[in-house]
Image: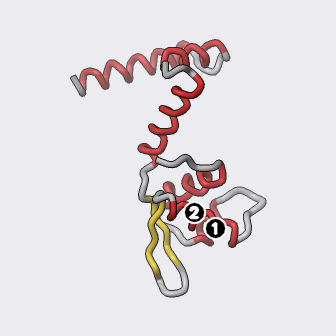
Amino acid sequence: MKKLTKAEEEVMMVLWRLEKAFVKEIIAELPDPKPHYNTIATIMKILVEKSFVGYEDLGKTYRYYPLVGKEVYSKKSVSNLVKGYFNGSMANMVSFFVKEKDLSVEDLEAIVKAMKENEQNNP
């Protein structure tokens, strides 16, 4: 799976939320200052070429929809983050966030609880 730029990810976030959208609808959901129509149209073309987005041809316009789910992309992105910055170790990543005070004891307890539930549901 190809990596997305920050701008492409921002557009994909909108498209995942809307599920199907025209360029104008995507622009309306983006923060100010709004990008130019041609900018978003170009990003959509790139996302189609990268096989992240499909489209319906509706005459003079296209309605876009995601081909890659948010969860699938998120999983791959986190995996790449862990490999690239934490030597492939989730423990190193969690330790980093604990040291940076971005992860509380309550957060760690929630992670352990989720892991136990996942283990019980997927033996």
Q: Residue at x 63, y 49 (%)?
A: 5
Would you call the spot at circle 2 few (<14 residues within 10 Å), some (14-19), or many (20 or more)?
some
Residue type, mark 2 in image:
Ile
**Residue for badge 1:** 42
Q: Residue at x 57, y 28 (%)?
A: 84
| Image vertical order of residue 116 relative to residue 84, above or below | above
Residue type, mark 1 in image:
Thr
Q: How is the image coloured?
A: secondary structure
* Drawn side of residue 3 relative to residue 101, left or right: left
Q: Residue 83 in the image: x percent, y percent?
A: 52, 27
Mark 2 near mark 1, Cβ–Cβ under 8 Å? Answer: yes
Number of the label disc, if any, that sits on residue 46: 2
Would you call the spot at circle 1 few (<14 residues within 10 Å), some (14-19), or many (20 or more)?
few
Looking at this view, name the residue that lies furthest to the bottom: 59
Q: Residue 88 in the image: x percent, y percent?
A: 49, 22
Q: Which quadrant does the C terminus fall into? A: top left
Q: Identify the element where label 1 is drawn.
A: helix
Q: Residue 116 in the image: x percent, y percent?
A: 33, 18
Question: For this rendering, which residue is in front, 19 or 4?
Answer: 4
- Number of labelled discs? 2
Q: Residue 38 in the image: x percent, y percent?
A: 69, 72
Q: Identify the element where label 2 is drawn.
A: helix
Looking at this view, name the residue that lies furthest to the right: 33
Q: CA distance from mark 2 to mark 1?
A: 6 Å
